[in-house]
Image (cartoon, rainbow, N blue to C red):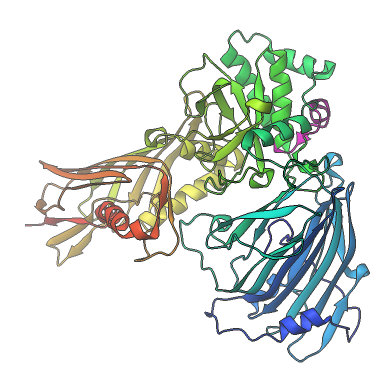
Amino acid sequence: MSGRRLVLLIVALAATSSAADVPAWLREAAAQPHPAYPPQTKAVVLLNEEKVLVEPSGKQTTTTRIAIKVLTLEGKAEARAGNTFDSKDSKVREMKAWLIQPTGKTREYGKKDIIEQSLNSDELYSSFRYAGAGVASEIDPGGVFGFESVLEEKTVFSQYAFSFQNLQPHLLSRFQVTVPPGWKAEAKGYASAPAQPRVSGETFSWEMRDLPLIEREPGAPPIGSLVPRIRVSLVPPAGEASSALATFAAWPDLSQWLTRLGETAAEVTPAVEAQAKALLSGKTTAWERVRAVAEFAQGIRYVAISTNLSKGGGYVPHSADQVLAKRYGDCKDKANLMKALLRVAGIESWLVTIYSGDPYFTQPDWPSPQQFNHAILAIAMPDAPALPAALVHPQLGRLLLFDPTDEAVPLGYLPVHEQGAYALVLAGARGDLLKMPQSAPEQNHTERRWDITLEADGSITGTLEEISTGQDAFDAGELDRQLAQGKNQQITQYRMNRAMPGVELRDVVRNYDSVNRRHRLTLGFRAPGYARVMKGKLWMVKGVPMTYDAMPNVNRPERVQSLVLQPTSFTESIQWHLPERLTVDELPDSVSGNNDWGSFQTEWKQSPRQIQVQRSLVLRPGLVSPASYQPTRKFLMSFNGAEVAPFVLLAP
């Protein structure tokens, strides 16, 4: 379904009648036969249709029709649909829903049954609304939910993003746009979606049929990068332009448009200046000044809001003065406040619009604001130390990227789900699409050090020290901050117990060093019955007590979706101390490997009364295609093999 139009919100509605005048389009959709689907299929979308009528003035009327057949009890939650909009420039002209039960009984839900509510109760965002319907509590498996809405908007958009599918199968999915006289519509198609429309006068249509269930595979990209989708741009007649509808031939055009939308929001008011001076007091270097402002901006409460609403409202930051006074804002508000505070320090910066959560989502061949859902900041830092979040812009010079919305990732780094993504720097005519920095594997490093004594009864005692840097350290530090100490102890106990059932822990210390950006876990342990002893003579001991948690999931022998690899660096050293009466009979083989995605090594060594295990793994980030999955799986499973390989001891 269109990500722009459908919000996954379940709302129970009161029935308004025992019989309903179900529209012909819904009855026709409900009567369509569909193939047998796998047992895990929750529902089938019989119709997913969005029709947009665009007028030269910028007025836009969007008609949405949805028909969903519920197949299982779990699928009842799929019977829902709705619209998001900005009430300042939009209105819901019509909205209805219907229910057709398997028995043939029908019900209609009218205006008084439709739920309309603010997307957020905070004052700055009170105009953003949701209106929708859902019948999860009433529909039976085999029933059909229908939804129709007509939304009028005063829009500046001349571009549209439409996804033909979500995870559930779709029988018919269609997007249609009727353009002003003389205009045309052009599309980019992704994941097998058709780019060429069917044209009838000034109406352009794209459709797909019989789309199967999409089963999520572990480690795959988010659904937005997997489903068939189109990106549509309206094109005015040659030599003409529209004052009402913005068009973008290239990324600098979009940069200029978005820059103009927010150019007054970063005004330095007396309140902003006073706050900046308080933050900058005693800070002598540019780095100290930027860090003080960055930490303050991270502390501003985050309030989420969509960036693709109505008349560009989702792209316009609230003034820095407002956000400072209210002490809350969304991503662009926080970045814009930081921009205004840095102005007082004489440091230039620019908002950057990016897609957060999937670095592979934005396509460089479609200049459009609808490819982004998030805003961060690019800071001019010509003399800053070498850091993972720095890049060189061809016109703006050396920039440091920072996300003030992320409370865990400090200045100098980018969240891993934004690294490598395409993002647009909003610097007027100098702005352009850039690929965000990607941290090197060694910048996301975890090291484990074990010292383990095997006791005469088969139990083990020892210590573990685990030190992490990069995203793992930031996440662990944030977890420490958010959770009470007792809860953190429970998490550590659960994690260790999975590796060594019945393990007893002592002296557990978790510590995040905010200066050196490191997280350190230390603990002592005792695990009874760790060794398997056969007839008192043959001892089988698993040499690697714990799996490496951040390994990609390669359990499936084959894939149809790409496998996402994150930048990874891992080392592990394990020192085993053996009882005097036991002798080493067999050690696993030392192994190593290299492929396009990285390298690994596992080395086993023996010395008197001791065994040493040394392991290392380096993975480069990227997408492993299904065609390349088999050799990569073999490579990763070779590294995993050490985690189950035992060494063998003999008793006299």
Instruction: Give the quadrant of residue 202.
Output: bottom right
Q: Is residue 406 visible?
A: no
Total numbered badges shown on the rendered structure? 0
Q: Is residue 636 left or right of residue 378?
A: left
Residue located farthest toward the left when viewing the structure as drawn: 652
**Magenta span of residues:** 317-331
Identify the image quadrant of residue 300: top right
Instruction: Using residue 37 as the reference point, say whether residue 83 is left or right of it.
Output: right
In the rendered image of this protein, does residue 560 appear above or below residue 186? below
**Quarter holding the C terminus?**
bottom left
Instruction: Tell me if 552 is positioned left or right of 433 in this view.
Output: left
7 with respect to 359 (left or right): right
* Residue located at (56% from left, 49% from top): 361
| Image quarter hosting the N terminus | bottom right
x, y percentage for residue 553? 40, 57
Asked whether residue 489 is drawn in magenta, I would say no
Residue shown at the point (26%, 44%) measured from the top left: 600
Q: Name the residue located 72 percent from the left edge and 42 percent from the top edge.
A: 247
Q: Residue 652, relative to residue 408: is it above or below? A: below
Q: Does the magenta run of residues contain 326?
A: yes
Residue 81 seen in this snapshot = yes
Q: Quadrant of residue 405?
A: top right
Q: Position of residue 246 (x, y in %)?
A: 76, 42
Residue at the extreme right of the image, as rendered = 112
Q: Residue furthest front?
A: 239
Above or below, 565 relative to 480: below
| x then y, percent, for residue 369 | 68, 43
Q: Position of residue 331 (x, y in %)?
A: 70, 37
